[in-house]
Image (cartoon, rainbow, N blue to C red):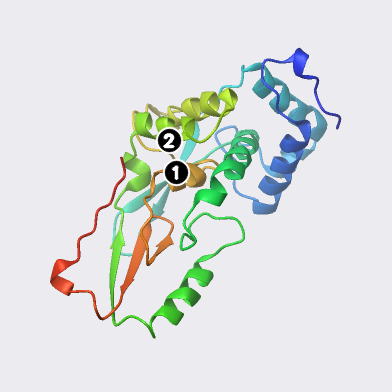
Amino acid sequence: MGEPKSKEKPFVISKWAVWEAYQRVKANQGAPGVDGCSIEAFEKDLKNNLYRIWNRMSSGSYFPPPVKAVEIPKPHGGVRILGVPTVADRIAQTVVAMELEKRVEPMFHPDSYGYRPNRSALDAVAVCRTRCWESDWVVDLDLEKFFDSVDHALMVKAVEANTNAPWVVLYVKRWLVAPIQHPDGSLHERGKGTPQGSAVSPVLANHKVGHWRGASFFRNGVLFQCPPSEPRGQLSLHVALQ
């Protein structure tokens, strides 16, 4: 695929970026979204489907469809709602996620392992294991319902501070307010939160999680390993999500 001429579209988005995003989505597999279109079905008209994504994103006319709600039972009761975008929407989200990653990856704390390229929970465990020989106690915490409750205005503000691409901000805003479609077909409008399970949510989440020295980040959980010299009664944790 050739590169688009900047004068033809209001936003300069590489066709190769759309192709790379498709390759990532294909590698991750995943279930169909609200349109019922699988990756295999999408690939039956691959060239036109990818061109349609690029054309709409470059024109500023791309609007995400509703996100499919899937209930995942929690081990100790209750359910977690995952949002499953359509295949086409996952590709579009990945285009934006890749653009954001280029800007923000060098800024993330070296102890951050959640939703990071070429990093995993096992890498974080390996670091924690090493630090067990240096620290004699830990503080383990979880940011409860982070994906369900993150403030949209603050999220957009964080994105604006880390990109000079107006199309990235435009589509982040549209994805944040894309409705959730429940199994009965009803739509739930969202005024806060970002769907856990979408392609762009992980990099958005990393925009909002603070950085603490000596902490290992696992998605929306944090593990502090403190040296023996730290007075236990004086430990103060400030979770700065704003």
Would you say the residues marked 1 and 2 are in contact, meaning their CB atoms lie under 8 Å apart? Answer: yes
How many other residues sit within 10 Å of disc 2, few (<14), some (14-19) or many (≥20)? Answer: some
How many other residues sit within 10 Å of disc 1, few (<14), some (14-19) or many (≥20)? Answer: many
Specify the label residue 158 is tagged with.
Answer: 2
**Is 210 on the left-hand or right-hand side of 118?**
left
Q: Is residue 184 visible?
A: no
**Is 127 on the left-hand or right-hand side of 92?**
left
Give residue 91's quadrant in the image.
top right
- Residue at the spot x=18%, y=74% of the render? 231
Does 54 appear above or below 99? above
Residue 201 picture location, percent across and down: 48, 42
Give residue 4's quadrant in the image.
top right
Type of the residue with mark 2: Ala
Q: Quadrant of the N terminus?
A: top right
**Is 92 on the left-hand or right-hand side of 66?**
right
Q: Quadrant of the C terminus?
A: top left
Q: Give the alpha-carbon distance from disc 1 to disc 2, as whole Å.
A: 6 Å
Camera-side residue of 11 and 29 = 11
Q: Is residue 56 visible?
A: yes
Specify the label residue 207 is tagged with.
Answer: 1
Specify the label residue 119 is tagged with.
Answer: none
Q: Secondary structure at mark 1?
A: helix
Does 188 appear above or below 125? above
Type of the residue with mark 1: His
- Residue at the spot x=50%, y=76% of the render? 126
Q: Secondary structure at mark 2?
A: helix
- Residue at the spot x=77%, y=26% of the render? 51
Give residue 217's quadrant in the image.
bottom left
Camera-side residue of 26 and 118 = 118
